[in-house]
Image (cartoon, helix red, strand yellow):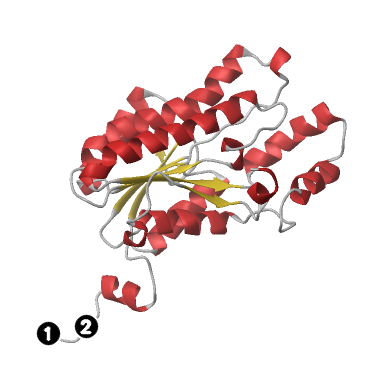
């Protein structure tokens, strides 16, 4: 031996998560959280393929459809020959009272937030269980535990997503696969900023007042940083989380301590 320390050992020495040689597929990779998740996993040594319907540096496909998922999985296998980590992060939002909620928007939100993760899991399943240590991590939300006016489709889909993750945990357990979710609180991503305009119109209130009311329901009175959520996802993707499955890790600055 020449005494040279390899990248995996260097990662261990500096307290990293040792994702060297692991292949991750991340949906919603061009968004405010998704891009940070991709960078975080890559920094921990993983080979990352990001998927989104738009954006640069990602595989362009629609992860809410069967065809899009087959394309994404085939592309990852062609490039890397395996899939070890699946991060289900694609998201959309539509804000409206139930009485006025368009069926088309309901279908769009539920397809991306619930049907899409099911289709992605199903497409990647044979490769995730090909060897022990497979990981599924979904981006849920505090809305998976609580509710808020004008978000019927989003709240319903996020509640359903937790059920899907629990079933994946039960079915994956015999294969050494874990399935978990993170539940971020308020993050000031593009998704929230777009929603804020609708909230201002519906509530007849200012952006500042709405933001203050949202933060007031947390123990820590600030938005969650995307890096904080990405760090939790990276932990759940690592060998260090091997004893955790079928669980939800809140990254919410204490929001659920108030009313979850």
Neighbor class of circle 1 (other Cα within 10 Å; few <14, some 14-19, many 20+) is: few
Which quadrant holds residue 191?
top right
169 left or right of 209 in image = left
Taking depth in this image into account, of 11 and 148 the one nearest to the observer is 148
Determine whether the residue tagged by mark 2 lies in a helix, strand or loop.
loop
Residue for point 60% across, 19% down:
105
222 left or right of 20 in image = right
**From the viewer's perspective, is residue 71 above or below residue 11?**
above
Res. 186 visible in picture:
no
The residue indicated by pointer 2 is 4
Circles 2 and 1: CB atoms closer than 8 Å:
yes
**From the viewer's perspective, is residue 95 above or below residue 30?**
above
- Checking the image for residue 46, the label placed there is none
Which quadrant holds residue 39?
bottom left
The residue indicated by pointer 1 is 1
Residue for point 29% across, 29% down:
70
Taking depth in this image into account, of 216 and 108 the one nearest to the observer is 216
């Amino acid at each position: 031996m020449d005494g040279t320390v390899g990248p995996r050992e260097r990662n261990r020495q500096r307290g990293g998560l040792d994702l060297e040689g692991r292949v991750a597929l991340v949906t919603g990779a061009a968004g405010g959280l998704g891009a940070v998740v991709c960078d975080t996993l890559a920094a921990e040594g993983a080979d990352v393929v990001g998927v989104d319907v738009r954006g640069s540096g990602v595989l362009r496909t629609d992860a809410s459809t069967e065809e899009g998922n087959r394309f994404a999985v085939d592309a990852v296998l062609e490039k890397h020959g395996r899939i070890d980590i699946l991060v289900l992060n694609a998201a959309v939002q539509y804000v409206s009272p139930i009485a006025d909620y368009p069926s088309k928007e309901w279908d769009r939100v539920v397809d991306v937030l619930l049907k899409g993760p099911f289709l992605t899991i199903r497409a990647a399943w044979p490769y995730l269980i090909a060897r022990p240590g497979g990981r599924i991590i979904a981006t849920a939300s505090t809305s998976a535990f609580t509710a808020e006016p004008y978000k019927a489709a989003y709240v319903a889909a996020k509640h359903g997503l937790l059920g899907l993750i629990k079933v994946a945990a039960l079915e994956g357990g015999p294969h050494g696969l874990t399935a978990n979710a993170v539940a971020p609180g308020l993050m000031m991503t593009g998704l929230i900023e777009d929603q804020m305009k609708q909230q201002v119109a519906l509530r007849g209130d200012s952006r500042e007042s709405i933001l203050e009311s949202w933060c007031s329901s947390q123990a820590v009175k600030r938005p969650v940083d995307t890096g904080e959520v990405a760090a939790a996802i990276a932990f759940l993707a690592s060998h260090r989380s091997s004893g955790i499955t079928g669980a939800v890790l809140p990254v919410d600055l204490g929001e659920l301590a108030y009313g979850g």
